[in-house]
Image (cartoon, grey):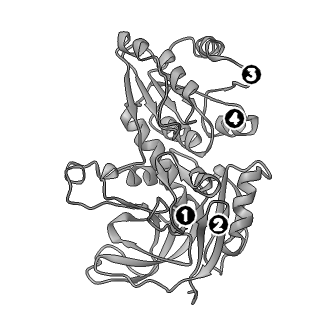
Amino acid sequence: MAQDNLTGILVRKNEITLEQRPIPVPGPGQVLLQMEVVGICGSDVHYWLDARCGPFILEAPMVMGHEASGTVVKCGPDVKSLEPGDRVAIEPGVPCRTCEFCKTGRYHICPDIKFCATPPIDGNLARFYVTDEDFCFKLPCNMTLEEGTLMEPLAVGVHACKLGRVTVGSVVFIQGSGPIGLCCVAATRAYGARKILITDVVDYRLELAKKMGATYTLNTSGMDEMQIVNKVREILKEEPHVSIECAGSEMCARLSMHLTRAGGVSILLGMGGLEMTLPFGAALVKEISTIGSFRYNNDYPEAIEMVRSGRAHVRDLVTHHFTLEQTIEAFETHRDKVGNPIKIMIHCNPNWKPDQ
């Protein structure tokens, strides 16, 4: 067990520092975790480069990190389901538990949720982190800590699939093959989708999408809206039951509405502009349900089971590894696209060795 608590802090726009902080103490119902692996999310990079992500604005220094796995090292009073040595995936948002949304099972939209690395709440890019017992999920013995970290983006995909009612035989159109789009491919395949078409403008991402289960890929570079509409229809030879927009792009949101078949579902998942011009007239006459998908709720257990059972494969998302001391280099690698990054992992345990 490490004896220090080196922590990665976003001080302000374009400035990340590493500093020592006290090792936290778990309270009732909480556990102290030796942090193992923290993934870099696109939202982390937005905060670093722009000091904001969508409506969330950085106004004070904040610990980074929310995609994470760890090992329990100490339990606070009243902890019943975990013990030291347990490896866990960490769901990074802890709600109030008492509001209308929490009591009706939609705790992810609790107005008082404390979500890691969403201002002003600190994240978990550190040697040690304390969180609530019931937001830690034991990893099966056949899953790695890296896969545990990837349960966060996979849970995003699972949640979108549930909202879109993806099931056996569904035809699914996904836009954006970053980690979230790729996790949507994995989740839709696990749910039994018959056809999956994913688009992007980066070939190496589309190649990975194919490996992860996409039936078709389409590079839309240089194509206008109607060219994409016609090409998607040509490839699928039918319209999708479900469209999942993962790029945060107005044009992609428009395409979802144009292409989704009558009675289908258009999921808006990418964090884009606060205002968009969308063809709701097209959605109206086809009775398309347009639904925003935000984070996840009660989706971690299903994401873990998908990987444990072999129905979903996420290991290939990981392209780069860094130590906690190399945090700045890790973020620069993401920004500069060095080595075609998909998912960059930061290893917080000082005992980690490459290829272990």
Q: Earlier in the sequence, mark 4 or mark 1?
A: 1
Q: Earlier in the sequence, mark 3 or mark 1?
A: 1
| Whole-percent x, y for residue 84 in the image | 43, 82
Residue contact at pointers 2 and 1, CB within 8 angstroms = yes
Q: Earlier in the sequence, mark 4 or mark 3?
A: 4
Q: Which residue is mark 3?
A: 222
Quarter of the figure with the C terminus: bottom right
Which residue is depicted at the point 35% across and 50% down?
297
Residue 20 quadrant: bottom right
| Whole-percent x, y for residue 83 in the image | 38, 79
Separation of residues labelled 4 and 1 (CA atoms): 26 Å
Viewer-side label of 2, 1: 1
Q: Which residue is mark 2?
A: 346
Q: Which residue is mark 1?
A: 65
Separation of residues labelled 2 and 4 (CA atoms): 24 Å
SS at circle 3: loop
Give the amino acid type for the residue marked by disc 1 in the picture.
Gly
Viewer-side label of 3, 2: 3
Residue contact at pointers 3 and 2, CB within 8 angstroms = no
